[in-house]
Amino acid sequence: MNNTRIFKTPFADIYPFYIQKAEKKGRTKTEVDTIICWLTGYDEQSLQQQIDRNVDFETFFSRAPQINPNVSKITGVICGYRVEEIEDELMQKIRYLDKLVDELAKGKAMATILR
């Protein structure tokens, strides 16, 4: 996996797509925010600040207060890659987020998603 262009992509550019994906399946922006906060340790206010500052994914994850210690429980395939086998730490965090939003859109219960 060598597509590091995503690292410099503003998180705020992708965030609406996470919400759109969830809302198409009857889920909410609040649920997406809950997932992001669970994964990164941001609270709602600090999450919004990162979005407003238009930080890239690399900065977004480097500033994250604390990556949830249960991320190792996130397993499965996203974009053709097993998330637990991704070697690049930043790419793995991005794919963890993608996987969690996918699970939300597929109708999984929040308790299951948040492990």
Image (tube, rainbow, N blue to C red):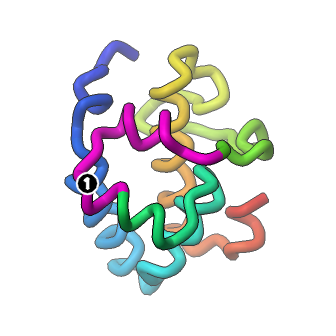
What's the residue at 64%, 71% (across, down)? 108
Q: Is residue 114 left or right of residue 92?
A: right
Q: Could you say which is closer to the camera, residue 59 or residue 15?
A: 59
Q: Amino acid at mark 1?
A: Arg
Is residue 18 depicted above or below 82 in this figure? below
Q: Quadrant of the N terminus?
A: top left
Query: In the rendered structure, does residue 5 fall within the stretch colored magenta?
Result: no
Q: Quadrant of residue 19?
A: bottom left
Q: Residues within 10 Å of mark 1 (few under 14, many from 20)?
A: few
Count of numbered marks: 1
What's the residue at 51%, 49% (across, down)? 97
What's the residue at 49%, 58% (across, down)? 102
Element marked by disc 1: loop
Residue 72 picture location, percent across and down = 76, 36
Residue 35 picture location, percent across and down = 58, 64
The residue that label 1 is drawn on is: 53
Residue 112 picture location, percent across and down = 75, 66
Q: Quadrant of residue 41?
A: bottom right
Q: Is residue 24 left or right of residue 89?
A: left
What's the residue at 55%, 22% (across, down)? 89
Is residue 11 depicted above or below 61 in this figure? below
Report the magenta residues as a range.
50-65
